[in-house]
Image: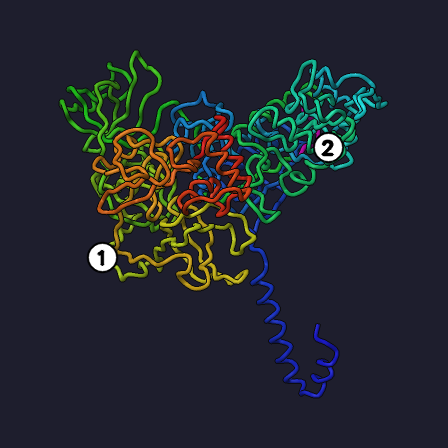
Amino acid sequence: MLPKNKFMQIKLISNKFIYILVTIIFLSCIFLSMMNTKVMAAQYTERYNSSSFKDSTYPGYKTLIDSLKKAHPNWTFTILYTDLDWNQVLKNETTAVHGRNLVSSSKKGEWICSVCKDKKYDNGSWKCASEATVAYYMDPRNSLFEDYIFQFENLQWIDGVYTVDGVKKIIADCQYLQGNKITYTKTDGKTGTINKSYAQVIYDAAKANNISPYHIASRIRTEQGPGKNPSSTATGKYSGYVGYYNFYNINASGGTGKEIIQNALKYAKSKKWTDPEKAIKGGAEFLAREYINRGQNTGYLQKFDVDNSDGSLYWHQYQQNVSAAKTESSSVLNTYKSIDSSLSWSFNFVIPVFKNMPVTRAPQPGSQSIVTQNIQVTRSTTVYSSQNTSSSKVGTINKNGKVLRIEIGNTKTNGYYWDKVVLDNGKKGYIVSSGIKLLDDITNCNIRGTATEPGNMRNGPGTSRTTVITTLTVGQSVIIVEKDKYKNIDGENWTRIYLSDGRQGYIVSRYLKEISDSDDGNTTPTDQDTIKVITSSGLSVREHPGTNQKILTYALKGDLLTRIEKEVSNNDGYVWDKVITEDGIEGYVARGDSDGAYFEVVKNGQTYTEIKGSGFKTSGTNVVCEPNITVQNIKKVVSDAVIKNSDGKEVTSGNIGTGFTIKANGMTYTVVKKGDCNGDGTVDTGDTYILKCVILNMKKFENDIYIKAADINNDGSLDTGDTFLLKKQVLGLTNIVL
């Protein structure tokens, strides 16, 4: 609203001018509002209607939902139109942050991330899940069956469904939650009594917060476990925290079991949860506030944060176990059936749908390892049509002959381990996995290209009998390894490519544009250009334009990005461009004070060399390494590399350390080993001590190389977040990964 004196002045002006002025002000306000409004996906919900649901746009849902509806007429279904692209969601749940989704360490083959491989996470019992694994569990169509549907159950309160007796059945095997009265230990060590049962307290807590008491009961049972006694966080007897309770293990994190318990009880103390009733009600309020009432109102949405109603995606996920929502839904189903075998209650299920989903459901991963490798056989080898020596013969590989391997068998079939291979004519078959030598066939590949349309990268040429590794984003940068070797396979020519994270495979050749010297230097025919990060602190790739927006991933100094849209907005004092990372993640970066302050445009014809392998990669003039990298690891990739320690002495074996130099390809790189703060090549308690001293201003690092090594979370600063991650690495509770 304009000030009063301004209105007085306007009265003296003609009505025509008033109209023009007001129109300008109105339009300006709209423009400013648009500039400062948080950009959010245009998601919405709609009650499912079989006759109007677009099965052609969202294939495979309709038949499955209709079948459930027919079996259970009282059930209702709500469709969550996420407005998210399936492939981008998959990338954000996998390659954007390795370790975001985990599988049991007992899993192998296709279940395991091909970048992280056998790297252990958390307490050593978990491995990073592959894209195929995440796709399998995240695809809602794989769970639209009675056995798994309850991961989509709307966890908000439904009148007429829940009873105290139902709660009792869920916690029946938790002996510590039984009885008509609750006895507990008070903060003074004396015994207190609450004249209610645990079941009644759970029921009341859920109703007060408008959420399902069965969900609350199941969550407590999951966190505290069945049996005679709860964990130390719910006994009220833990030393130093007598009389405090945390049934949900909220904030239970740390490097040791002791630290985990203490952090959970410290949280309980801060909330004054001095008896079981206060703890259960307070925890229910937390779950309602932080998850259920902020859009994540199903087990699925708590595991996969694809609801954008709070303006953020992917980061607010309850647990890392990729199968958690699906497996827990079976337990919930069994509980419900024990109460009402017909499941006649009026349940509501929230089913998410995504844009550009595959026509068929994501398949369950297999035990075989999906690879793209050139191998050499040490003897004449028969190629069979199936994993059986009695099957028909596809061809023969002569002694010392080379062939493309696309699967490695990890279990015996018909008495042998079998590998799937592709012959030069494109035919596929199986060979007995013995007498095989792996060939290094991706050295000195520096022809860059970009994806001109979305395309599946497969482990071998052709759409039949191959596996999709990932889907490229338009504009995603790749290295071309071998162009058009396989022609007219399933109607297409196929090119072998290499991604920035080390994965490789085959893509339809017409989906790629080779970046050559004939290009104009700044833009491609698709009006894209390549930019190189030059700021030493790296560059945040954010979900939306703005410094307060969620960070999807980080681009380190020297990383190349494809800029697909310039000057998207001017928020928070920065010009923002839309980019695609080498991993295919779409996001937004700030230019800095001017175009080129944070990055520079790379001439399209420019080629580049880099040192890259599992656990290390080039970043500008640095080679950034994970803690376990040795000299031999580098030599395996660049055999003629000259490696010197910080004293200038050449080394040929052992650990590589921060401050070491690598001379290769006519360039000299300086090593940054994450966590190695003293440059001795090992990550141990000596490094945690140094980092602690630096943070407390008791010591300073000699140069920026050690600062980069100590900045474990890559946020541009040294703080307790870095010491926490470093401590977990030293204790063997987790692994620092790039």
Mark 2: amino acid: Lys
Residue drawn at the location 78% of the way across and 31% of the way down:
278
* Secondary structure of the residue carrying numbered label 1: loop
Q: From the viewer's perspective, is residue 440 above or below residue 96?
A: above
Q: Is residue 302 left or right of residue 716?
A: right
In the foreground, 673 or 706: 706
Name the residue tied to disc 2: 269
Q: Nearer the viewer, mark 2 or mark 1?
A: 2
Mark 1: amino acid: Asp
In the foreground, 537 or 551: 537
Q: CA distance from mark 2 to mark 1?
A: 65 Å
Residue 176: x, y in percent?
Answer: 73, 17
Q: Which residues are magenta?
A: 343-348
Quadrant of res 258 = top right
Residue 509: x, y in percent?
Answer: 27, 45
Q: Is residue 136 left or right of residue 185?
A: left
* Secondary structure of the residue carrying numbered label 2: helix
| Number of residues whose C-alpha sits closer than 10 Å to that of mark 2, classed few (under 14), some (14–19) or many (20 or more) | some
Q: Check if residue 347 falls in the magenta segment.
A: yes
